[in-house]
Image (spheres, rainbow, N blue to C red):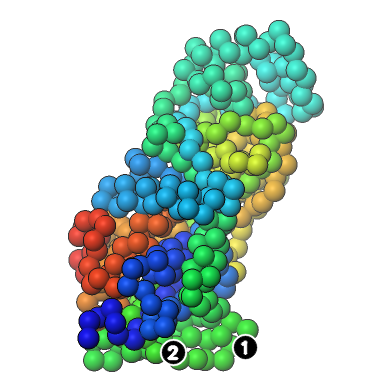
Amino acid sequence: MTVNSEQRNIVIIGGGIIGCTSAYFLTRHPSYDPSKHKITLLEASKIAGGASGKAGGLLALWAYPSSLVPLSYRLHAELAASHSGAERWGYRKMHSGSLTAKGRTIGQQSAANGNHASGDSVSLQKLKDKVSRTLAAAGIPKDLGWVAADSARSYYEMGTPDNTAQVHPYQFTTAMAQLAEDAGAEFILGSVTSIDRTGGAVKSVTYNDKATSEPHTIAATDVIICAGPWTRSIYPPAPISALRAHSVTIRPSKPISAYALFTEISLPPNFGRTDTFQKSNRAHSKQVTPEIYARPNNEAYACGEGDTMVPLPKTTQDVVTDDSRCQDIIDYVSSISDELRDGEVTARQACYLPNVQAASGGPLIGETGVKGLLMAAGHSCWGIQNGPGTGKLISEFVFDGKAKSASIGSLDPRKVL
């Protein structure tokens, strides 16, 4: 009897992008047989409740690690083609660049763009050529007109539609979950409390049902830990820490072109609203680096720097959002864009990113040294980008006993466990 003909009870821990793509690719593996292979995904709170639902969704061939990125980037395109990704989860190719800009005080008039300080937009046709010349002088692409001409200082191209794309993280993750469920995977809401590893091999997983809090134990021949920043709470030897990140979404006052911007904004003295901006920062200029991603359907995503002020909570539903940090992000991006300044803020949110605390970096993908126990965690800010590749490789570890689609020896968990 071969390994692929045996009865298998495969348990995935974590309902973020890594767990959901693992479930998807397990159900698509040539050896998968729903009559013999049971796939169960356990999630403590909700599918895509953490960073997988609140990330930026940038995809790039220039991301890292280089051993995983090409496979995952290609799979993103194939998934979008197979499952109407453009319509279903906002997959599209785009530009990306590094923008240096000078921020304007909140409510400051943007004369170059013909806007009044009140925020009312006035279209002055005679200013169009002047704006174009100003942007061109700064090296700003012609179609990046939603960056104020009097703010832009320089632009460096990082990516083009040939090597950069995007998805909406929540839509993509939940779509992967639904497609896996349609193919036979079972999704259960429950918090894992223990993994039985008697005799050096996995035997079962015990969890508390989310609805009833009652404990349940299910048999397991294979367990895949995909718990992101919560990995250490399930498997303490894992060297994975958590970094809190805040973000906002804005509906711009006018449609904006498809760019992902990594900004460096010089704020003027006394910048900010006094009710949200820290007093210690109002007396002098400051450099801030928010990222701004234009999305389909007239939405913009913006995020700021991470922090470790609040320890990782028990589940994603317990994450605390600091409204003042969100307001800072809104103020920063508003200082360089009238379309964002005059837009509608549609979400203020926070999540935790998993970082591998080891010289090798991350993520950690593969065997752990315990028979049947695999790990796929520590993807940092590139979890959405590297989700499909990770899921594909996990399916190969389970059914083929090794990674076949990419050489990821440098990501072997056993090197740091």
> What is the three-letter code of the residue carrying label 1?
Thr
Q: Is residue 212 above or below residue 281?
A: below
Q: Residue 114 appears at what percent x and percent y?
A: 72, 17
Task: Report the quarter where the N terminus lies.
Answer: bottom left
The answer to whether one can see residue 275 in this image is yes
Is residue 179 or residue 44 the one in the foreground? 179
> What is the three-letter code of the residue carrying label 2?
Ile
Q: In this rendering, would 378 be left or right of 58? A: left
Q: Residue at (71%, 37%) from the top-left corner?
A: 343
Task: Report the quarter where the C terminus lies.
Answer: bottom left
Of circles 2 and 1, the one toward us is: 2
Q: Quadrant of residue 128?
A: top right
Q: Residue 360 appears at what percent x and percent y?
A: 24, 56
Find the distance from the CA under tag 2 to the CA under tag 1. 16 Å
Crowdedness near tag 1: few (<14), some (14–19) or many (≥20) residues, C-alpha within 10 Å: few
Is residue 110 or residue 6 the one in the foreground? 6
Q: Is residue 18 above or below residue 279?
A: below
Crowdedness near tag 2: few (<14), some (14–19) or many (≥20) residues, C-alpha within 10 Å: few
- Indicate the secondary structure of the residue bearing disc 1: loop
Q: Residue at (56%, 57%) from the top-left corner?
A: 170
**Which dot marks residue 218?**
2
Q: Residue at (57%, 73%) from the top-left corner?
A: 45
Check disc 1 and report the residue beneath it. Answer: 212
Q: Residue 245 appears at what percent x and percent y?
A: 51, 53
Is residue 308 or residue 244 the one in the foreground? 244
